[in-house]
Amino acid sequence: MSVRAPDFFIVGAPKCGTTSLHRYLQAHPQLYMPQRKELPYLATDLTDQRPGMALSGEAYNDYFKEAGARMAGASWVMYLYSKRAAQELRAFSPEARILVLLRSPAEMLYSYHSQLLTHGLEEIENFEKALDAEADRKRGKRLPNWLPYPESCLYYTEVARYAEQLERYFDAFGRERTHVALFDDFCGRTAEVYRDALRFLGVDDQFAPSFERANPNARARNASFQRRLISPPRWAAGVFRRLPKPVQRFGRTIQERLFHMNTREAPRPPMNSETRERLIREMEPETRRLEALLGCDLSAWRT
């Protein structure tokens, strides 16, 4: 079976504005973005760890059957973190273009931890304790037993190693096919950063969507129910995979609606200043490496 290879990918990083960018590009008449944002396909170092996590080629194709002649794109924030994704995407879609959004590691990780809690993927409520658990988790300890994602997604500082992640895409696709934008610029100059992305993709850059904020901070109303939604019993998941495809699609729609009904928008308190300083200090070598790689000043990430 031939699988439709997208023309471009939004690869991450988490909590850096990728949901908003996905929606803004989705609104463009020359582009096609599936309604579902996160499409786990390839990135086999991650997806092979969790049977049933990756989409089949047939299921992946279903998301693009309405694309027609439009330029098609796909998103998954774990593509940047994955050690294999860059080369696998290159083999899958050699002429693809890559969109990357990056944010201060301290701010990204604080927001990422909050999202993992909301999605039922993290059980340590305290951010500092979750950071401190990384060493134990790398030894297979203190991991949620219901986790449907690879355990390595809870290695917080590894998720924030942007330079080595970005180098993989520069090596696979070249700098001319990899477009990097910063979260602060995207928030402060949204229309300009959006136009830059459109020019990079080679489509009409005069189109402007409604720049509404997407993916605000939220919390689960009932954490136990959220965990059941994202990680049902193994027997139930097995039965679900044997159902007809239309029934599976309907089931996922119901699951998504229940998930959103069980979440509420909730402001996130400011990060502890000592924790911020700790993360800035720990990530400083990576920040300097990224500055050299991109040729830009990231001094704002140090405050």
Image: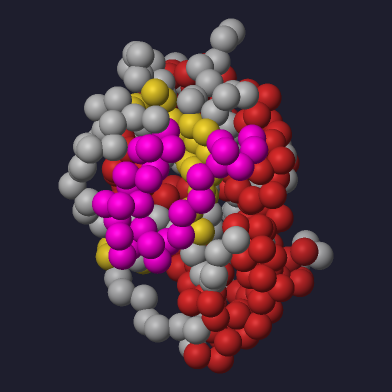
Question: Quick one: which residue is furthest to the bottom in this view?
Answer: 274
* Quarter that holds the N terminus: top right
Q: Which residues are magenta?
A: 173-201
The percent position of residue 81, horizontal first and vertical second, equals: 64, 51
247 or 19, which lies in front?
A: 19
**Residue sitting at 56 percent across and 41 percent down?**
178
The percent position of residue 127, horizontal first and vertical second, equals: 54, 77
The percent position of residue 227, horizontal first and vertical second, equals: 48, 55
Is 190 situated above or below 247? below
Question: Quick one: which residue is furthest to the right in this view?
Answer: 139
Q: Is residue 189 magenta?
A: yes
Question: Quick one: which residue is furthest to the front in this view?
Answer: 295
**Residue sitting at 64 percent across and 51 percent down?**
166
In the image, 14: left or right of 156? left
Quadrant assignment, res 245: top left
The count of marks equals 0
Per the picture, the main secondary structure of the magenta-coloured stretch is helix
Res. 109 in view? no
225 or 38, which lies in front?
A: 38
Res. 138 in view? yes
**Residue sitting at 36 percent across and 38 percent down?**
198
120 or 82, which lies in front?
A: 82
**Residue sitting at 60 percent across and 61 percent down?**
295
In the image, 11: left or right of 36? right
Q: Is residue 226 magenta?
A: no
Is 206 situated above or below 240? below
In the image, 50: left or right of 272? right
Quadrant assignment, res 186: bottom left
The percent position of residue 165, horizontal first and vertical second, equals: 67, 52
49 or 203, which lies in front?
A: 203
Question: Quick one: which residue is furthest to the top in this view?
Answer: 1
Quadrant assignment, res 291: bottom right
